[in-house]
Amino acid sequence: MPAVPADPNVLHPMPEQPRVVLLRPLVTSPLIEVGEYSYYDDPDDPTAFETRNVLYHYGPEKLVIGKYCALGEGVRFIMNGANHRMDGPSTFPFPIMGGDWAEHFDLITGLPGRGDTVVGNDVWFGYRTMVMPGVRIGHGAIVASGAVVVDDVPDYGVVGGNPAKLLRRRYADEDIARLLAVAWWDWPAEHISEHVRTIMSGSVDALEAAAPGSI
C-alpha cells in the first residue's frame, strides 16, 4: 500500500486542536517565506502569527523559515524595522510623531540593518523565545524556552538564556556533517512517510541507510 503523507496545505493539521496551524498556507506577506510542515502553536490566536509574532516588519528584509520547524507559543521575531538611531544624544524617533518633526524623516530611514532572518530546517523553538534581526539559525537547532537569540546558531546547536549562548551540540561534528549531507527534510514526503520512525528515533547510520537511492 503506498505511503500517504500528511497534507502540507491544511491550515489546521489537528482539527481537534485549533491552536496549531501550519504556517505555509497561513502567511500572505511576500517578506515571509516558510517551508512545508512548519507549524506554530498558540492557544490564543495562532492565525495572527504575521502581525503578533513577526514584529516591526517594514521591509525589505525577509523572514525565512525552513521545513519541519516547530514554533512554540509566543515565539517572536524582531525585524530590522525596530532599529533606532544610536549615533546621537537621543535614540527617540521624533519624526514618526508627526507635526514639524516629520520633516526630519530622513533621520530614521535607511538605518543599517543585519539583513534577512533565516531559520534552517527542523528547528525547535521553545515557549516564548525571541529572535533578533538578521540572526541565522542552523538546521536541527533547538532554542530553549525564554531564550533571546542575538547571534547565529550553528547546525544542531542547543542555545538558551538571555542573551542566548550555545549550551551544547546535539551531535559530534562528523555526525552533523553526515546529517547535513543526508538532508532528510528534502526527501519526498512519501519517502519520509515510510521512514518516520528512523527520522524520529533512529541512528545517523540508519538515517543514511534510509535515504532515497541508498542500497
Image (cartoon, rainbow, N blue to C red):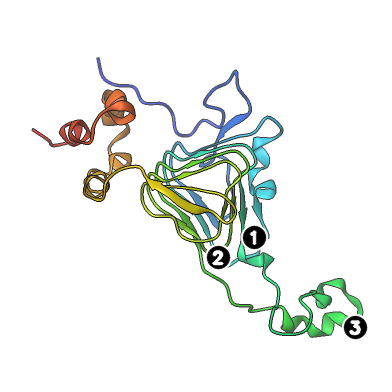
Q: In whole angstroms, how far apart are the C-alphas of marks 1 and 3?
A: 26 Å
Quadrant housing the N terminus = top left
Residue at 53% of width from left, 70% of height from top? 114
| Side (left or right) of 39 relative to 121 | right
Which quarter of the figure is the C terminus placed in?
A: top left
Dot placed on the residue nearer the N-terminal end, 1 or 3:
1
User: Mark 2 is on which residue type?
Assistant: Glu
Which residue type does callout 3 highlight? Asp
Q: Position of residue 139 (x, y in %)?
A: 37, 48
Question: Around disc 1, counting alpha carbons within 10 Å, would you say few (fewer than 14), some (14 to 19), or many (20 or more)?
Answer: many
The residue drawn where x is 60% and y is 18% is 16
Mark 2 crowdedness (10 Å alpha carbons): few <14, some 14-19, many ≥20:
some
Q: Residue 57: give its label.
A: 1
Res 198 quadrant in image: top left
Q: Which residue is mark 2?
A: 61
Of the numbered discs in the image, which one, if any, rests on residue 100? Answer: 3
Depth check: 8 or 206 in front? 206
Q: Position of residue 181 (x, y in %)?
A: 22, 48
Residue 64 location, x and y as percent? 48, 54
- For badge 1, the amino acid type reads His
